[in-house]
Amino acid sequence: MRVKIVDLTLRDGHQSLLATRMRTRDILPILETFDSAGIYCFEVWGGATFDSCHRFLNENPWERLREIRKRVKNTLISMLLRGQNLVGYKHYPDDIVEKFVTKTAEIGLDVFRIFDALNDVRNLVTAIKTAKKFDTHVQGAICYTISPVHTIERYVDIANQLAELEVDSICVKDMAGLLSPKVAYELVKALKREVGLPIDVHSHYTSGMASMALLKSVEAGAEMIDTCMSPLSMGTSHPPTESLVYALNEMGYDTGVSLDVLMEVRDYFMKIREKYSGYLNPLSTIPDTNVLVYQIPGGMFSNLIAQLKEQNALDKLPDVLKEVPKVREDLGYVPLVTPTSQIVGVQAVLNVLTGERYKVVPKETKDLVKGMYGKTPAPIREEIVRLILGDERPIDCRPADLLEPEFEKRKSELEELGIEASDENVLIYALFPQTGLKFLQGEIQEEPFPSSVASVEGRFEVEVDGSKYRVEVRPM
Ligand code: CO
């Protein structure tokens, strides 16, 4: 049986371990060799790369895609698209989504992986429909999390909604590394049986289970697995490409990948890892098993601790750790992934520090309850809605239905500023009005490489219900 290897080194790999800082000039030299290895698909664009390129590296993200496209001839190239959020952090109007997807497809991207943090399929419709107009492979991704409402039946239901939109495959996207081998097997089996589309499994190594989850997924019939070249694997990243290829080949699966070529590629990325070591937090390189106990991703701990430190209230950490799951339940069991992890974290801290639950409610929490991010996995209880919104009522339409078209407006703004208003430039500006404009005006400089190894931020011992836990502070 064929198992297709999707290598994420050039997007999720450096996003997970090197703060998304790999420069295009360090990506291009290895592409020709890498392209001859027999990998099915390289994930090279999207996620945080668009933001990081223009904001920190003074690089035009469109140029990066074009240069990569030129050099990759045998392997498909893919991107991660955050549904209506595209590669940003808020919902954009439909005309921006359509333009963005069109431009990307025209440059020659092969595979669009599209997800929504809340798994609200309405937030994927515009992007999926636009990408389907081109000769591309459209992959609908389901965010995996654990909660009483996140059952296998529910994931099957979401996958069926995606199948109705005629996606070409389904991705199980396990952002926090919560997918255990047993559940991976059951989930993939159920998806194969009930939905029938090809399945790709994406599982971060965060809790140390990802290699096991991938192997069980393949045994259950998954056609594609996500990996990263060993120098940028493990920790908050993904299982090593070489190891998975070896194990699968030995078990009689055909990956079509040459380990000899991968050895050459590995040498290259070892040098990259060294060069970028200043970005690497040592703690993101080892598994964080806390997540198995608390269900709180490691990155979220750092934020909680930073907030409490700022308020001089680190002693309240145990209370906050108890409050997080309660807030998550109140807010409809949202997955703890950007941006909902921040919303739940900040609210839990506020609930504890003010001594009264929902006495202070930031705009983001209100927006979530109002439905501005989409439908929460479970409905929010009426008393919580009242407590947070008062007399205001939640919306029940798709959030982007409330947004006016924006492309032409942004375009004339650029023209007025005397900046070339090409579609690509307008999109950079529309997606990131502040930093995008600075970039277009030539005011961004490439940041220098950090001189020293990123420091271990710290370890704390906390007591929750009489048990002591050691908490490690990690980068988000
Ligand atoms: Co990922």
Image (tube, rainbow, N blue to C red):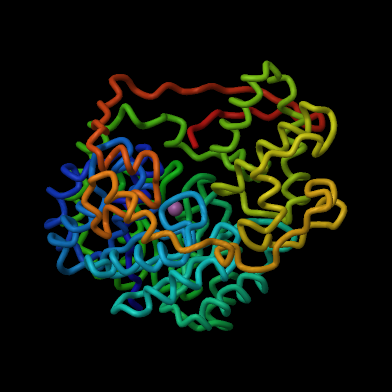
Residue located at (42% from left, 29% from top): 282
Quadrant in the rendering for residue 242: bottom left
Whether residue 260 can be seen here: no
Tell me if 230 is positioned left or right of 64 in this view.
right
Quadrant in the rendering for residue 359: top right
Q: Nearer the viewer, residue 211 or 65?
A: 65
Residue located at (30% from left, 49% from top): 414
Residue 415 locus on image (x, y percent): 27, 51
Q: Nearer the viewer, residue 241 or 40?
A: 40
Extreme residue in the front direction:
416
Residue 192 locus on image (x, y percent): 52, 79
Residue located at (60% from left, 73% from top): 158
Q: Eyeballing the image, is 222 above or below 30?
A: below
Whether residue 108 can be seen here: yes
Residue 211 locus on image (x, y percent): 45, 55
Q: How many marks?
A: 0
Tell me if 216 is positioned left or right of 450 in this view.
right
Residue 77 locus on image (x, y percent): 27, 64
Q: Eyeballing the image, is 230 above or below 147?
A: above
Extreme residue in the right direction:
383
Residue located at (22% from left, 36% from top): 442
Extreme residue in the top direction:
312
Q: Quadrant of the N terminus?
A: bottom left
Tell me if 170 is positioned left or right of 230 in this view.
right
Quadrant in the rendering for residue 189: bottom right
